[in-house]
Amino acid sequence: MDQSVAIQETLEGEENCTITVNCDVLFNGVTESRLLGLVESAQEHAIFIYTHRRMAITADDVSLEDIIPISLDFAVVEVSSPEELVIVGADTRVRINYKDEELELRLPFGSHSRLFLSEVNKAWSDVCRSPSEVPKFEWIKKYEKAPRSQEAVKQALAPLAATPSNHNQDQKTADKSSDKKGALEKEKSSNIDTQKSKLHSSQESREDRDDLVRSSSHTTSNKAQILAMPQFGLRDNLIKCELLKNEDSYTYLEHFSFFLGTYNVNGQVPKESLHPWLSCNLNPPDIYCVGFQELDLSKEAFFFSDTPKELEWTKAVSDGLHPDAKYALVKLVRLVGIMLIFYVKKEHAEFISDVEAETVGTGIMGRMGNKGAVSIRFRFHNSDICVVNSHLAAHVEEYERRNQDYKDICSRLQFRQLDLTQPPLTIMKHNVILWIGDLNYRIGDLDVDSVKELISKKDFETLHNYDQLKRQIDEEAVFVGFEEGGIDFQPTYKYDTGSDKWDTSEKCRVPAWCDRILWRGKNIQQQHYQSHMALKTSDHKPVSSLLIIGIKRINAEAYKKTFEEIVRNIDKMENECIPSVTLSKREFHFKDVKYMQHQAETLTLLNDGQVPCQFEFIQKPNEATYCKPWLTANPPKGFIAQGGSVNIELEVFVNRSTAPDLNCGKQQIEDILVLHLERGKDYFISVTGNYIPSCYGTSIYSLCHLREPIQDMSPETLRELADVSGNENAATTEKPLDIPKELWMMVDHLFRNAVKQEDIFQQPGLRSEFGEIRDCLDTGMPDSLPGSNHSVAEALLLFLDALPEPVVPCSFYQQCLECCSNASQCEKVVSTLPQCHKNVFNYLAAFLRELLKNSASNRLDVGILATIFASLLLRSPKKQDLAEKRKTQEFFQHFLTQGSS
């Protein structure tokens, strides 16, 4: 999650936080976790240092502690000692000097830390290039309540000296070699062991513990890391590409055991040991990947807040690991209630590198994190591995929604590469993919009694034929190329909590194998796949799988020989040839582009030259980006081996930011892409298309003046309405509608069919059904809208989100904030809105009050509706901070309470 949002909410005026990083601050033997933000104002930069919670989401989660201006008195240097040898995978230690102050930091290994340091150095270089223009830093004075001296930092840290460092978001660390102990050990403590000591509430002597990562230079054990080091030039990319092509000549397979576990804990706290689940094997596994779902079911967690249950379940896992080995906690990542923890045997820690974690929410409007996935990718020796823990949509009938969630996760979950010039890595671009979680696929076409009868007979093979996931995989709708072991255990859902009894509640859920483990890749053998009935904390049973995976390791001598041969060949090619490519086509036309409907065409580049080549789409003169905002090229840059080819997806997608100008004809689907070859020529590619206007992205004013469907209107009419939108005094030929007919259609449908719908406005709909709803609204007035109630509800939210001018126009926003605590003043502000906007506001508020009358059925309350709708009805003209968000919710709550006018 981007923590710059939390820092930005603490800033005033024109200051902007450009990048953040978590780190450890080292001072007089004390190590404390801090959040650093690089803040810019009027081309001046400073590093803001914050204390913070485990996951800083809002301004409430951080507290400004110190500010270090980046001036001529500033310096940042990497710290090392003669005793320490640098290895790939180690934390980055730097020392920041400002005048007489000095601060030592330890940044977690990874591309993000390097990017942060790169931006800091860039800011410092800008100061050095213009020494005559001395920065004044007047804007910093307003923050001077924060301590500015090293003594102040010491005082701030002193009360925390006894508390172990909580570097929760990146546990991967590297210590020096095993013979460097004693005093040096005290200065460079292991971040992983510190976390483990906190979880066990006891500290073992650092001198007594085993080292996690042995320091070394690029020897046989870590030669593979050269492939993952940052490369920026064409020559380096050529070498890297050729190494990857020839890796079979210098690698060999070694087998390692991976324990995969998944457990939906139903919002419970740990009540029993996890040892029967996590230590079910005779021999300790080399790697643990443990996933949880529904860690916290509170409403606060639903809206991305922190949760104490993270630490409780992490401690339970740590206590339950196999007792015959010592493990290092490499990484933990969480999205609301979905959590993934990655442990490795200490002796393997030095071979883990390139650790990155990402999350993606697939809840309502694709934003809420109650459903979605968390993922960790890493390199183990010379194999790239991606682990995904997902929680997909619930309910028997929603298998298509689960399919959509899976596809969204695959397309939206991307990892930064170490080489920041390269496009992000997707899940499928890994040697090994391990997918665990509550996938929520159910048993179909059988009633509960028939299912239980088959379970009592242990006829799992017959029952599995009715499993929705098996059917969807057989139809190649999801998990293409993945494997799952045979299921010879009874369904893991749903039980009465605290027992082995099937669900006896009123709903009497049909038992199902919701909790699953799948994999994709070569040289993988499954040793076991089982559930663990002994654990009774949840209404699910945990599941585990032990996989034996062939991991690629480096043969040093073969690697050296291959590397030298590649360099010789590249030297020869560079001196003799220039690159060239053949394009499959140079003109692309996208027909009938619609709002939020993805279209893609494939451009194939064939390297017909005598040398490998590097390509990139570049900006045209006087343009900020290489393409229009509705267009993307994926990948936008890359590398093609000699005689090879690459497919580039040209993707068109119109969203709320691009729809308004396309709807009224001010913009067209037209662009020219410039494809540049390094050391070669440029190629020009034409992209055209026709856009079909939609009510999505059209103003309230325009829609109220359209009595016919928008697609029946001429472009001239739409352009004229857009030009006078918001001007109530503009001459009109007929009386406008009170509210847009499209809005009425959706609200009326929900009023008649969904006021008692469980989880309405909290559970997302199907994207395919949204397209059908949009087409109905844009083309005519059917008797009823297609799709489920959830799809119509989400379509309504998307409609409000796409309005160019929100229901409460931006010019009224400040007034709403100022009067948010006074109900009568709030009503007075609404009464002064433009007539069509006022009508829409009152109409929506009345509808939502009707929903609240049925809260016992639909599980809505004032807080949930205010949180969801306030952000859509009252949009800030600028970036909205946390205080403003709360004020908008307070404002709107006045209109949701009983008795409102």
Image (cartoon, rainbow, N blue to C red):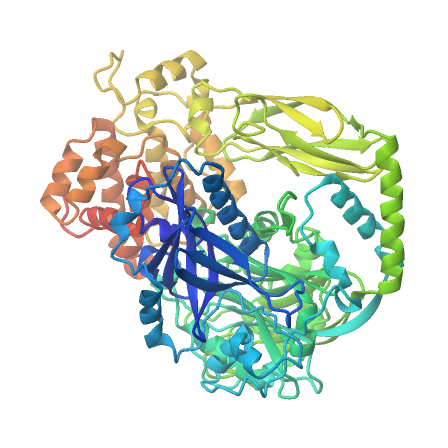
- Name which residue lies at 61% across and 24% down: 591
Q: Quadrant of residue 209?
A: bottom right
Residue name at image x 41 percent, y 36 percent? 132
Vertically, is 734 above or below 213? above
Q: Is residue 661 above or below residue 808?
A: above
Asked whether, in this view, residue 795 is left or right of residue 815, the answer is right
Give how far across and how far down residue 81 sits, in percent: 60, 68
Quadrant (top left/top right/bottom left/bottom right) for the C terminus: top left
Q: Position of residue 20 (x, y in %)?
A: 45, 53
Query: Would residue 40 appear left or right of 124 to someone viewing this image?
Result: left
Q: Residue at x 81, y 37 (%)?
A: 612
Q: Could you say which quadrant of the image residue 309 lies in?
A: bottom left
| Residue 570 locus on image (x, y percent) | 85, 41
Left or right of residue 487, residue 58 in this image: left
Q: Residue at x 46, y 58 (%)?
A: 96
Q: Is residue 466 visible?
A: no
Measured as percent of width and height from the top left, residue 528 is found at 72, 77
Task: Give the farthest residue toward the left.
Answer: 824
